[in-house]
Amino acid sequence: MADALYKTLLAPTTLVDWDRSDKYHNSHLLQKDQTLEFTVQNSEANGLPPIAVSPAQGKFLYLLAKSIGAKRILEVGTLGGYSSINLARALPDDGKLVTLELKEHHAKIATENITKAGVASKVNVIVGPALASLQKLASEPKFDFVFIDADWDNVSNYFTEAKRLVRKGGVIVVDNVVQNGCVGNLADTSEFTAGVRKLLSALKDDNEVEATTISTASGKGYDGFLYAVRK
């Protein structure tokens, strides 16, 4: 029995398998959410790229933030506000989410979606280059949770600022750190993989955080999150 299970686990899989599995699990664990469905539809209707986190990943971020009792959350990369809404829902009524977005149009659509979701009172959308915005943020009060999902050539700089801004014991999550296995393929020299490798290299000797990578396979492909805790 154990040998058979082992062979099954080692059998090659494809995007079709991941998508089927994702939908099966979601059918049991995720409730129909008209607000999030509107967010996806409104974002795509207004020309935003379909690169937001998946429904299961959004729920995962919500649960992570809720599990640590987050009251202040920082997000780098708003896009259409899909992950922003999930994170804002994890906050208490007096909580605050600060989310950074480069493009005015994206921020406008995200604000529409966040308002539709009924969480606008908890959310502050800041428009402009994320690194400059991060550097302007005061180091107090600290954030409890940081989610980084933005341009990868700057991801190590974002992480450095996140360490300054998050409390001890706080969590930093970075999206897209596996990229279909390309990050571990040194023959791939794209700016995306180079940015993640730079972050991983810096973390190797970083004594300020403890971190690990968790790979994910879903209908959106093979990727993963980096999960770090500030010491």
Image: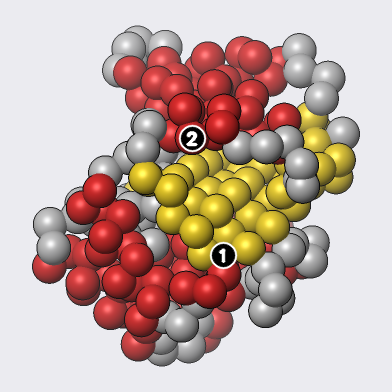
Judged left or right of residue 25, residue 229 is right
Which of the two marks, 1 or 2, is nearer to us in this view? 2
Judged left or right of residue 69, residue 129 is left
**Up-down relation of residue 5 to residue 135 (above or below):** below
Label number found at residue 30? none
Residue under pointer 2: 133
Image quadrant where residue 191 sits: top left
What amino acid type should be assigned to the residue bearing mark 1? Leu
**Up-down relation of residue 85 to residue 200 (above or below):** below
Residue 139 place in picture, x, y as percent: 73, 36
Residue nearest the observer in this picture, 195 or 15: 195
Q: Quadrant of the C terminus?
A: top right
Residue under pointer 1: 87
Judged left or right of residue 146, residue 17 is left
Residue 61 place in picture, x, y as percent: 58, 61
Residue 111 place in picture, x, y as percent: 34, 66
Residue nearest the observer in this picture, 2 or 37: 37
Residue 102 place in picture, x, y as percent: 33, 40
**Up-down relation of residue 134 to residue 173 (above or below):** above
Q: Secondary structure at mark 2?
A: helix
- Look at 26% across and 53% down and name the residue there: 106
State yes or no: discs 1 and 2 in contact (Cβ < 8 Å): no
Residue nearest the observer in this picture, 155 or 194: 155
- Look at 55% across and 53% down and name the residue there: 98
Residue 219 visible in image: no
Image quadrant where residue 166 sits: top right
- Look at 79% across and 61% down and name the residue there: 68
Residue at mark 1 to residue at mark 2: CA–CA distance:
20 Å
